[in-house]
Image (spheres, rainbow, N blue to C red):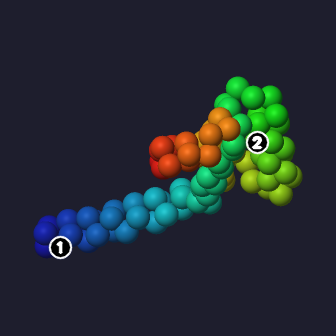
């Protein structure tokens, strides 16, 4: 009888823990890749990225909560795109 009680207890604990894990999962984070032709320190390039982020935030997409931006800066070199990492 003890073995049956143990197995019942174990199965109940496993079922409960999987429900708790699923309940904690939030909205999936989306990734947006951005290739900017400017250098990273260029003020105009920074403003372009900021404007895009503000526009998406107005639509409910918040960096770090439900969206992640992967920004690559080409620094005015069109051939540099091939050398940028694809994280």
Q: Looking at the image, which is closer to me, 18 or 6?
A: 18
In this view, 45 is above or below 17: above
Q: Mark 1 — residue?
A: 4
The N terminus lies in which quarter of the figure?
A: bottom left
Q: Earlier in the sequence, mark 2 or mark 1?
A: 1
Q: Position of residue 52 (x, y in %)?
A: 80, 48
Cα separation between marks 2 and 1: 61 Å
How busy is the neighbourhood of tag 1: few (under 14 within 10 Å), some, or many (20 plus)? few
Q: Is residue 49 shown to the viewer in this render?
A: yes
Instruction: Identify which residue is drawn at 69% across, 42% down.
Output: 37
**13 to the left or right of 84:** left
Instruction: Identify which residue is drawn at 46% across, 66% down.
Output: 19
Q: Mark 2 — residue?
A: 49
Q: Looking at the image, which is closer to me, 62 or 49?
A: 49
Instruction: Identify which residue is drawn at 68% across, 32% down.
Output: 39
Q: Is residue 50 shown to the viewer in this render?
A: no
């Amino acid at each position: 009888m003890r073995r049956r009680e143990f197995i019942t207890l174990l199965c109940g604990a496993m079922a409960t823990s999987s429900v708790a894990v699923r309940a904690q999962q939030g909205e999936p984070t989306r990734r947006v890749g951005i290739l900017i032709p400017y250098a990273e320190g260029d003020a105009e390039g920074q403003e372009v990225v900021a404007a895009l982020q503000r526009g998406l935030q107005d639509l409910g997409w918040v960096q770090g909560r439900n969206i992640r931006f992967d920004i690559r800066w080409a620094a005015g070199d069109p051939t540099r795109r091939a050398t940028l990492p694809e994280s």
